[in-house]
């Protein structure tokens, strides 16, 4: 009686005009959501999902978006956009377990939605989750109604996974065979379980032919997973290599072509990264609508700023030290300290936040289980573009011709009227500007702080020396090679040992082949 | 002759100046603040320096200690472990500080320990750590493993935490993660988790490329319900969480519980892809009680007034709370001892209690120099804050010597 009275009160509360939209699901069903008992909350989600009404979907969606509120007297409200909440309403805390239950329930409900895109998304979402036997009837119902071939295929896989535990041997067999061309590593565990023996010696799966089929399916999945893993290592290696390449490309020009041991190279990278940060801040302040495209402005800005700093360095310090490598090394090292302190003074010693634009967040899944993240793909493409641009400038432009002429034979170039001093300045500026571009890329992957350059200076020199001084192709192959070796070594040896291994490898390699992978041949180069 | 007289006058003048300086110094009590303001740990430690200065201002505004104002001496050991020892010695020998508040990483604490023992000075250490240490000269205001790591793993194994069966222990390569993982491995084994179900991975300080590690976690997770226990320290957390988000590893599939990531570390990260990943601490900014409301408001006002970087979205976190509690307790102990003498203050520290922003009254244990603290587990929300999903009913006494490490059986009373 008391219970009825309470629901009556709740019903009256429902009718009262309220600023926040009242959830139109039986309040008695909603009340456990605001409670403390986790099992009761999970059960409430299941019962609300079973209503399969539009209101139920709204409540669950609100729970997922954390816009469901509870008042002190136990009412549960959905906050809509315009609505304000009564005083004392508190957000309902969702933990991972509840979140998973809600996501599963929502996907399950969406499977029967009239909208194809929603159904497709729901089926794919379910695929990523652990199989829930309770959802099997729903899956079968959805499968019967489904017309789209690709959604059907996804659903069939889902049903097959659930069927692996079925009592019916025929169903199990169909499931095992149906899964043969899946590359999902999550299927290994249930298939493996079928092959195992129970403690009393009997097989978990009594049917021998089924065990053989399961074994074959397992092998097929394993080989597919192994292939995806290999492709993954290749991709990670290229990705790390492209980062190294972007970091080292500027140095390939200033050290490789001009022979300047530029210890301040890392700080030019850092300047590029900080320019990106400044661009982002400006966009946030003045063009918040176009924030996603701040990188497009950051690229030319970083190039120009680093170019400017490079030209300034060359004019004021480096040009007086040509042909004196030891003094150049010390002077540029000093400059690197000055630049770092300058940035510390202006921006503070702490790292600054550079966010990925939204189009660089997330990734694409290939080969069943391998996720290629967009920011890595963009950076690989960007590295390829920068290499192409540098190659074009050096080989197809008048400036490039002069650069090569001066670097190969300064006196002869001078004699035929090439302004060697100006070319030196431009070349150093170009190398610095490219370092600035590298800084933009680095800002998208890691931390931007005054010490950013220090982390990359050793790697950059390693790449250039390994590739062979004075060779663009050498730098490219050196960078990608180092990235690949590192990534194939890391799973075996761990991140710490892989790094040490690479250093040892380079030391031995340079002992054996001091000129690097590719050497310039000719009389002009000593 | 003339020149000699000038010389003597100069000497006398200098001596008088020195005396004056000495007399002036007697009116204040100097305390040292030893936190990295640059380098890989600056992301975490800079705010501890600021909150220490705020606390000192607060104590001074209330009349100081024994009628004297506190004067902070701030040094920057620059995330350079041997430099910590040098700077500590400088604070004690040159600046004559009464106590030092500082250090974050265990390797920095280990580096300064001999200095504090040799000079018989006081260090207040505000960060959770691996235990296996008990120094007369140190007061630990952060958590011992049984106040953070063990409850967090128990939660992950519980039904509500997802019922994890397999564990990836991922950390930065130094003493804190190595020791914590040793304790956790022994603990997991006592719970029936096999060695093949535990994976231990380490990265160098400042590591930036987490592609392989995240891919491996994903592969390992295919074998059953997996949780990651992260003891990554410093700014490596940013690339790690970025990679985790981009790889689409959601907390509902593979929850990551971190012991060194709080509100401050998440300030530079877009937390939407990290929804539901966990952290275990003894305090979160989102805790609701009057003491915390006052603490958070004070900190935000301080950050704005001092124009700290990013002051508009200043946050508080656990080690900041521990620093705040530590300085207040030290001030209470000095007032009780009526002296800044190390041994008298140590004697007065035992049993000191303070109503902390966590909402609990914390007490300093006289025998083991650790605080009795509550344990809380929070899930990351979209706005960079944590929602507390589990906490202890009462404070927990620290066990600096973990019972899960062989040889510690005789030290459980400490």
Image (cartoon, coloured by chain):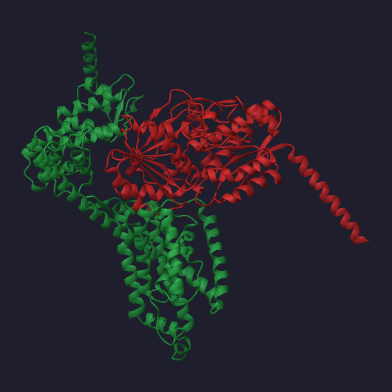
Chain colours: A green, B red
Count of residue discs:
0
Residue lying at the far front of the rendered structure:
A201
Asked if residue B286 shows in the view, the reply is no
Front in this rendered view, residue A325 or B184:
B184
Out of A352 and A23, give the one closest to the viewer.
A352
Q: Is residue A335 above or below residue B311?
A: below
Q: x, y (%) of residue A301?
A: 40, 64
Quadrant in the rendering for residue A518: bottom left
Lateral position of residue A520 relative to residue A147, left or right: right
Left or right, residue B83 beside residue A147? right
Q: Quadrant of the N terminus of chain B?
A: bottom right
Occupied quadrant, residue B117: top right
Q: Residue furthest right?
A: B1
Q: As drawn, which residue projects farthest toward the bottom? A: A415
Front residue of A481 and A83? A481
From the viewer's perspective, tell me whether residue A425 is left or right of residue A177.
Answer: right
Point out the image quarter for the C terminus of chain B: top right
Q: Is residue B407 at least partly visible in the picture?
A: yes
Residue B289 % position (x, y): 46, 26
Within the image, what quadrant is residue A86 found in?
A: top left
The answer to whether B268 is drawn above or below residue B138 in the figure is below
Percent across and percent down for residue B379 are: 37, 35
On screen, residue A425 above or below B108: below
Q: Position of residue A456 (x, y in %)?
A: 45, 61
Task: In the displayed orientation, state which residue is furthest to the top.
Answer: A1
Residue B170, compared with residue A320, is above or below; it is: above
Name the residue rendered at 41%, 34% in the picture: B187
């Amino acid at each position: 009686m008391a219970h009825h009275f309470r629901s009556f009160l709740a019903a009256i509360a429902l009718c009262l005009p309220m600023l926040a939209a009242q959830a139109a699901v039986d309040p008695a069903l909603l009340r456990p959501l605001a409670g403390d008992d986790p099992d009761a909350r999970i059960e409430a989600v299941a019962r609300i999902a079973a209503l399969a009404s539009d209101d139920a979907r709204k409540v669950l969606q609100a729970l997922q978006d954390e816009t469901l509120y509870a008042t002190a007297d136990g009412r549960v409200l959905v906050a809509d956009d315009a609505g304000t909440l009564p005083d004392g309403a508190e957000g309902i805390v969702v933990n991972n377990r509840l979140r998973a239950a809600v996501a599963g329930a929502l996907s399950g409900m969406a499977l029967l939605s009239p909208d194809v895109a929603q159904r497709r998304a729901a089926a794919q979402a379910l695929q990523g989750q652990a199989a829930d036997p309770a959802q099997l009837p729903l899956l079968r119902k959805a499968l019967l109604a489904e017309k789209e071939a690709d959604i059907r295929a996804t659903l069939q896989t889902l049903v097959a996974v659930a069927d692996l535990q079925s009592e019916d041997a025929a169903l199990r067999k169909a499931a095992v065979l149906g899964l043969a061309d899946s590359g999902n590593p999550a299927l290994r565990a249930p298939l493996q379980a079928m092959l195992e023996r129970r403690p009393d010696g009997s097989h978990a799966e009594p049917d021998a032919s089924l065990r053989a089929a399961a074994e074959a399916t397992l092998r097929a999945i394993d080989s597919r997973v192994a292939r995806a893993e290999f492709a993954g290592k290749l991709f990670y290696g290229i990705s790390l290599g492209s980062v190294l390449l972007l970091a080292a490309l500027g140095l390939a020009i200033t050290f490789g072509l001009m022979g300047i041991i530029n210890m301040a190279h890392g700080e030019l990278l850092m300047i590029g990264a900080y320019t990106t940060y400044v661009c982002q801040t400006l966009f946030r302040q003045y063009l918040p609508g176009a924030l996603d495209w701040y990188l497009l402005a950051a690229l030319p800005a970083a190039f120009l700023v680093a170019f400017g700093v490079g030209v300034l360095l060359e004019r004021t310090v480096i040009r007086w030290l040509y042909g004196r490598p030891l003094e150049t090394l010390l002077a540029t090292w000093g400059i690197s300290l000055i630049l770092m302190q300058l940035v510390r003074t202006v921006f503070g010693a702490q790292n600054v936040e550079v966010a990925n634009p939204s189009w660089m967040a997330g990734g694409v899944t290939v080969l069943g289980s391998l996720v290629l993240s967009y920011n890595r793909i963009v950076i690989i493409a960007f590295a390829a573009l920068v290499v192409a641009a540098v190659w074009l400038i050096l080989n197809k432009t008048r400036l490039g011709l002069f650069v090569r002429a001066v670097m190969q034979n300064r006196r002869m170039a001078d004699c035929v009227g090439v302004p060697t001093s100006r070319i030196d300045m431009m070349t150093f500026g170009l190398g610095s500007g490219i370092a600035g571009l590298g800084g933009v890329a680095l800002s998208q992957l890691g931390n931007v702080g005054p010490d950013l350059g220090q982390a990359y200076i050793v790697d950059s020199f390693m790449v250039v020396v390994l590739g062979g001084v004075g060779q663009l192709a050498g730098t490219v192959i050196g960078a990608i090679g180092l990235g690949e070796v590192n990534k194939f070594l890391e799973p075996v040896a761990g991140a710490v040992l892989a790094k040490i291994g690479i250093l040892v490898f380079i030391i031995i390699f340079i002992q054996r082949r001091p000129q690097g992978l590719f050497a310039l041949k000719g009389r002009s180069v000593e | 002759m003339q020149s000699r007289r000038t010389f003597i006058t100069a000497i006398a003048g200098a001596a008088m100046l020195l005396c004056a300086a000495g007399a002036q110094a007697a009116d204040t009590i100097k305390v040292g603040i030893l936190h990295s303001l640059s380098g890989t740990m600056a992301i975490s430690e800079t705010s501890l320096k600021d909150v220490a200065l705020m606390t000192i201002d607060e104590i001074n505004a209330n009349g100081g200690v024994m009628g004297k104002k506190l004067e902070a001496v701030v040094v920057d050991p620059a995330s350079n472990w041997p430099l910590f020892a040098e700077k500590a010695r400088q604070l004690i020998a040159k600046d004559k500080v009464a106590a030092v508040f500082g250090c974050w990483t265990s390797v920095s604490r280990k580096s300064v320990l001999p200095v504090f023992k040799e000079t018989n000075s006081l260090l207040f250490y505000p960060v959770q750590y691996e235990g296996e240490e008990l120094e007369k000269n140190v007061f630990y205001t952060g958590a011992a493993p049984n106040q953070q790591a063990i409850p967090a793993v128990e939660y992950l194994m519980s039904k509500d935490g997802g019922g994890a069966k397999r564990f990836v222990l991922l950390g930065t390569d130094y003493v804190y993660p190595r020791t914590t993982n040793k304790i956790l491995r022994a603990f997991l084994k006592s719970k029936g988790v096999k060695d093949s179900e535990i994976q231990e991975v380490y990265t160098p300080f400042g590591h930036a490329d987490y592609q392989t590690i995240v891919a491996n976690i994903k592969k390992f997770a295919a074998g059953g319900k997996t949780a990651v226990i992260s003891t990554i320290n410093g700014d490596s957390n940013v690339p790690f969480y970025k990679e985790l988000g981009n790889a689409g590893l959601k907390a509902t599939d593979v929850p990551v519980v971190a012991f060194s990531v709080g509100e401050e570390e998440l300030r530079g990260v877009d937390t939407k892809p990290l929804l539901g990943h966990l952290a275990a601490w003894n305090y979160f900014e989102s805790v609701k009680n009057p003491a915390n409301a006052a603490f958070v408001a004070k900190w935000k006002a301080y950050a704005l007034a001092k124009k700290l970087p990013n002051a508009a979205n200043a946050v508080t976190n656990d080690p900041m709370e521990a620093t705040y509690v530590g300085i207040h307790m030290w001030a209470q102990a000095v007032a009780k001892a009526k002296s800044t003498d190390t041994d008298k203050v140590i004697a007065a520290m035992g049993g000191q209690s303070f109503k902390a922003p966590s909402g609990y009254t914390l007490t300093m244990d006289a025998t083991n120099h650790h605080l009795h603290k509550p344990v809380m587990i929070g899930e990351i929300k979209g706005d960079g804050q944590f929602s507390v999903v589990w906490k202890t009913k009462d404070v927990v006494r620290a066990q600096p010597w973990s019972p899960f490490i062989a040889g510690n059986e005789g030290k459980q009373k400490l």
